[in-house]
């Protein structure tokens, strides 16, 4: 029986940054050996590969799509190149695959099928934000997206603030960039003035901004976050 290929989990640059400058050399060396990829959007994957200095003709590559519309029943066919013995890359749109990004189900199925999974070194917006925040990096929770409904969002923010105080835990979440401003408004309207809020915006880009201060201070001078990728971190110290 043919030995399966290896599934490499390939982080991408954040926000269209310089891939060759941000990714580790070890990641780039693996990347250029692959000709089969599982991606969210083939067009942006080709753009990323070109920016990373990929040396082979892009039109010769095999791209299979894994996005939010991919049904669980479709996952086995994505593994076909691997089961045929070919190495394959699971490429994120930005940051790390399977972290606030499609892919976890495919990785789990790869393990079940005896396929070796290798995560490669690259940027994670969640970890970079936590590193730069000055908030508790020993105990933290990532919640992905908060509810869009105003009342449900208000209740969730109150819950996160309570959990942070009770467990001495940094609470991390994100939002679709065009809704960042409404999320910031909800935070300053519903959370305590002494709760710390870090806004980590456009990480790794030339416009990067990471700032932590009490919500009372953010109220006085709220930044413009519209359409700027941002990680939000809340912390209520005991």
Image (cartoon, grey):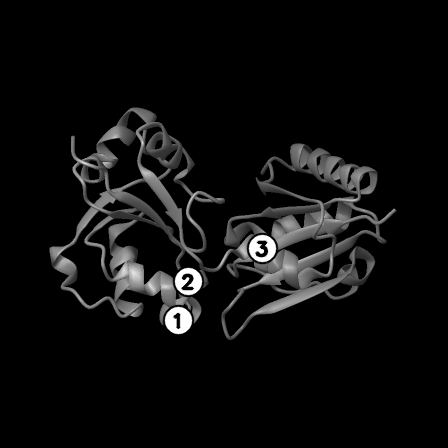
Lower sequence index among marks 1 and 3: 1
Q: With 162 as the anchor, is 174 left or right in this view?
A: left
Lower sequence index among marks 2 and 3: 2
- Mark 1 and 3 residues: CB-CB less than 8 Å, in contact? no
Q: Element at badge 3?
A: helix
Q: With 56 as the anchor, is 232 left or right in this view?
A: right
Return the residue at label 2. 13
Lower sequence index among marks 2 and 1: 2
Q: Residue at x 58, y 38 (%)?
A: 148
Q: Element at badge 1?
A: loop
Say the numbered circle drawn on residue 127.
3
Return the residue at label 1. 18
Give the image location of residue 211, x and y in percent.
Answer: 69, 65
Q: Residue at x 24, y 36 (%)?
A: 78
- Mark 2 and 1 residues: CB-CB less than 8 Å, in contact? yes
The answer, for residue 149, to whether it is visible in the render is: yes
Q: Element at badge 2?
A: loop
Depth-wise, is mark 2 or mark 3 nearer the camera? Answer: 3
Q: With 175 as the anchor, is 141 left or right in this view?
A: right
| Alpha carbons under labels 2 and 3: distance apart | 14 Å
Q: Residues within 10 Å of mark 1 (few under 14, many from 20)?
A: some
- In the rendered image of this protein, does residue 155 appear above or below residue 141? above
Question: Quick one: which residue is furthest to the bottom in this view?
Answer: 206
- In the rendered image of this protein, does residue 208 appear above or below residue 136? below
Judging depth in this view, the residue of 80 and 69 nearest the camera is 80
């Amino acid at each position: 029986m043919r030995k399966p290929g290896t599934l490499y989990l390939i982080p991408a640059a954040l926000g269209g940054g310089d891939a060759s400058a941000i990714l580790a050399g070890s990641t780039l060396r693996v990347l250029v050996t692959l000709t089969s990829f599982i991606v969210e959007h083939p067009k942006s994957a080709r753009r990323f590969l070109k920016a990373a200095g990929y040396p082979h003709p892009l039109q010769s590559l095999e791209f299979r799509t894994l996005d939010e519309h991919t049904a669980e029943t479709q996952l086995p066919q994505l593994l076909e190149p691997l089961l045929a013995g070919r190495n394959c890359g699971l490429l994120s749109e930005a940051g790390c695959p399977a972290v606030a990004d499609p892919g976890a189900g495919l990785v789990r199925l790869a393990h079940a099928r005896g396929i070796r999974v290798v995560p490669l070194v690259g940027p994670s917006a969640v970890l970079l934000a936590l590193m730069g925040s000055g908030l508790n990096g020993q105990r933290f929770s990532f919640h992905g997206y908060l509810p869009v409904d105003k009342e449900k969002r208000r209740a969730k923010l109150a819950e996160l603030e309570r959990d942070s105080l009770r467990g001495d835990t940094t609470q991390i979440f994100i939002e679709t960039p065009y809704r960042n401003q409404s999320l910031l408004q909800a935070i300053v309207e519903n959370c305590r003035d002494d709760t710390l809020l870090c806004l980590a915006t456009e990480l790794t880009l030339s416009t990067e901004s990471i700032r932590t201060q009490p919500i009372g201070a953010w109220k006085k001078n709220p930044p413009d976050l519209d359409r700027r990728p941002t990680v939000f971190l809340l912390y209520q110290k005991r």
